Amino acid sequence: MLTDCEEIWIAVAMISDAGFNFIQKNVNPSAKQNYLVGIELPTSPTVLRQLMNLDGNGLVESRIYHKPGKFFHPKIYIVKTGGKLHVFVGSGNCTDGGLDKNIEIGAKIDERNFCEKSLEWYNATNKNARIITEDFLLSYEVLFKNRKERIKNDQQELQILFSEEITPINLEKIDFTNQFFKKEHFQAFEGRKPFDRSPQSNEERQKVRNQLYRLHDKVLPKIKAKKWKLAEHYTSNDIVSSAIHGEYTANDLQAIWLHYGRDKKEIKAYGPKETPLGYMRLQVIIHKDNVGIWNRIGKDKGSQIDRDNLKQKLRTDKVYRETFFNVISNLPYGYFIELNNQPKFVEEFENEQALTEFLLSADFNQYFIIGIDLAPDDPRLSTQNIADTVITNFELLLPTYELIKHKLVL
């Protein structure tokens, strides 16, 4: 409906960069656009600046609504197409969450009287709204930064509040009949077992390791068929990580993984003592309650060459920043970036600047991961599907791998 509309009126409590970009990508470019926006919620100052710059061009009219003691909270979208009005009203703001990701409710109403009354309400309310000025924006941008920090703190407090109420996955209630990884594979990481060096715990973890080698036999031919420049570890015993505590393992073996990355020639070009441990790789990793498919850029104090390459390009290359943001934005729902022990879903990054700032904050002493975690009973992890699932997600992650990877000139 947006693509062939003649005019739209949007009155919402909040607009984000992602929400505004969605409208611009889908609306008829010759349509008149009218915006009435609240600022009690953290409406993006970037969007407000765009609206201010576009206002008066004949196609865009925008206002902000703010009155002390009055919370501007509507979510109404009026669309005129073919000379007729249509109203979309509900709970969703003009944000990525409101339009797609959140649990919202909305209705499309075509009844003539309701549509005309809605437009009358918009016009009456708009008369009492304010134009967006440069002076206002300069003050608002400072306020916005502080409010975002407060919201972040509020979300962290809520996470702590509800953390004890999150129900852990009950492996006993899962039907593992068709799943590639069975109950025993997840149970190998329960309780104190990650610390346990007994023959029994070693045997349980070894079963997980053997299963990952079976997965390798399924996945490697598909990687070669794709002709990706991804190699398994050049030592066959290290294609899958260790199931037994040793010099190069953590004290707590909370996971075992299968990984692919640079080949031996690439790694040894950095130095004869270099090993895959110090470099980025794509991996499948199993924990006690999920299976991750990740681009593990670096473990704690690891992959300095690749990490430094990313930071240097983010600081100096605008095209690189834009490309990286586009790659991350195109990752499906459920994908996350974890830095400094803080995971963020990719849809949380509303613009290139937000993503860049987050990536540049990476602490070399902490893990750096881009990936997705799947539940033990996810059908994508069935015996039939798992190899294709790994390849599909590797294909999504490969652009991040190639962008971050340091290219040594030989």
Image (cartoon, helix red, strand yellow):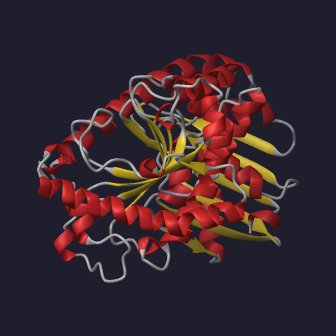
Q: Is residue 360 visible?
A: yes
Q: In front: 157, or 34?
A: 157
The furthest residue to the bottom: 177
- The quadrant where residue 376 appears: bottom left
**Is 104 left or right of 198, judged from the image as shown?**
right
- The image shows residue 287, relative to residue 409, as above or below, that is below
**Percent x, y of residue 351:** 62, 37
- The quadrant where residue 288 appears: bottom left
Q: In front: 32, or 341?
A: 341
Residue drawn at the location 60% of the way across and 36% of the way down: 64
**Percent x, y of residue 320:** 73, 32
**Percent x, y of residue 106:** 50, 67
- The image shows residue 180, relative to residue 402, as above or below, that is below
- The image shows residue 24, relative to residue 100, as above or below, that is above
**Percent x, y of residue 271:** 59, 23
- The quadrant where residue 220 appears: bottom right
Q: Is residue 167 visible?
A: no
Residue drawn at the location 42% of the way across and 51% of the way down: 237
**Is 316 left or right of 291, judged from the image as shown?**
right
**Is 314 left or right of 66, judged from the image as shown?**
right
Q: In front: 166, or 296?
A: 296
Residue drawn at the location 49% of the way across and 35% of the way down: 42
Q: In front: 172, or 326?
A: 172
Which quadrant would the C terminus be assigned to in this image?
Answer: top right
Which quadrant would the N terminus be assigned to in this image?
Answer: bottom right
